[in-house]
Amino acid sequence: VVGMKWERVPLSALCANTDDIRCGPFGTQLNKAEFREEGVPLWGIKQVNVGFALQTKEFLEPKTAKRLSQYDLIPGDLVMTRKGTVGNCAVYPSNFEPGIMHSDLLRMRIDPKRCDSSFLVYQLHYSQDVSRQLSLISGGAIMPGINVGKLKQLEVIVPPLAEQKRIAAILDAAAKSFFAKDSIDFALLKQWMEHRPSRELLDAWTHYIQGLCETLTAEQKNNLKNELISHARQIAQAAGGLLGFGSKISDAEHRVLDRLESMFD
């Protein structure tokens, strides 16, 4: 909420039960001899790294999955890699049947009354503060493994639930542009330069940026401002202007850029 500090809490506070943050089964609990070509899906790092866009080729018999039910995945679960590419995460899709996670994954079953999973994924992906905390947790090794106990204490910013959902909706729409490789703001800004943003969307983004700035230091705020505005101007120039006048930035684009810059005042 603009003008107010958003709450900062450990991940464990966003779950209904203490066991809702859990790593996958140990190697002795599941071996390759139990893998099947059909049955209950078994999910790993490859799938999480691409937001579950890649289907698994590994399955378990129902009786094996039942034995490992404490490691199950259900729609809405936030799934994170705990080895190799530590910290990558994705929401288990709503149209997927329940599955089981590999040992190299970690599940966070977020209480939907406390936090929106999609909002939390964006924060875990793009927050420099979260990245710093994850680095400390994993120890910086080449093949680190996240300590679940420490992960439960990782702190995140939690706006009111309605605000979380609004922010997530804006960023979801931006992500669907498929323009950005690793920057959600770049995708959103390019979309705006190619399709003039409505006043409502620009107001919503302004509200989000101003609220976010309430949580940042002066240096972090300045870095964010420089990155966003730099991206916006590069996109406007590369797109050749909304009206197609070469590399000239149109008056309409200038107004949007000025509005973006004013968010940080």
Image (tube, rainbow, N blue to C red):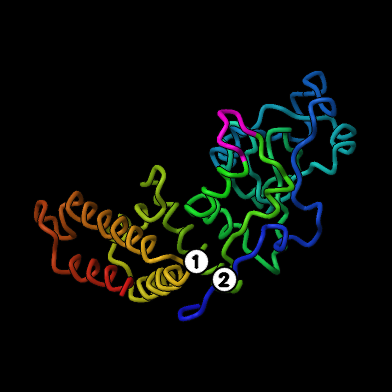
The residue that disc 2 covers is: 159
User: In x, y percent, where is residue 19?
Assistant: 81, 52
Secondary structure of residue under mark 1? helix
Residue at the (22%, 52%) spot, across then down: 234
In x, y percent, where is residue 121?
57, 53
Q: Image quadrant for the C terminus?
A: bottom left
Q: Secondary structure at mark 2?
A: loop
Q: Is residue 6 left or right of residue 74?
A: left
Occupied quadrant, residue 220: bottom left
Residue found at the far bottom of this picture = 3
What segment is highlighted magenta in the picture? 138-144
Question: Count the marks: how many?
Answer: 2
> Taking 86 as reference, is 30 left or right?
right
Q: Nearer the viewer, mark 1 or mark 2?
A: 2
Name which residue type carries label 1: Ile
142 in the magenta segment: yes
Q: Quadrant of residue 26?
A: top right
Give percent across and percent down for residue 105. 68, 38
Q: Is residue 78 magenta?
A: no
Q: Which residue is nearer to you in this view: 215 or 199? A: 215
Q: Which residue is mark 1?
A: 167
Q: Earlier in the sequence, mark 1 or mark 2?
A: 2
Q: Is residue 146 above or below residue 19?
A: above
Please identify the dominant SS of the magenta region.
loop
Q: Are marks 1 and 2 in contact (CB under 8 Å)?
A: yes
Q: Please tell me which residue is depicted at 46% across the width and 79% down the height of the picture.
A: 2
Please state which amino acid type lies under the numbered disc 2.
Pro
- The Cα–Cα distance between marks 1 and 2, rounded to whole angstroms, is 10 Å
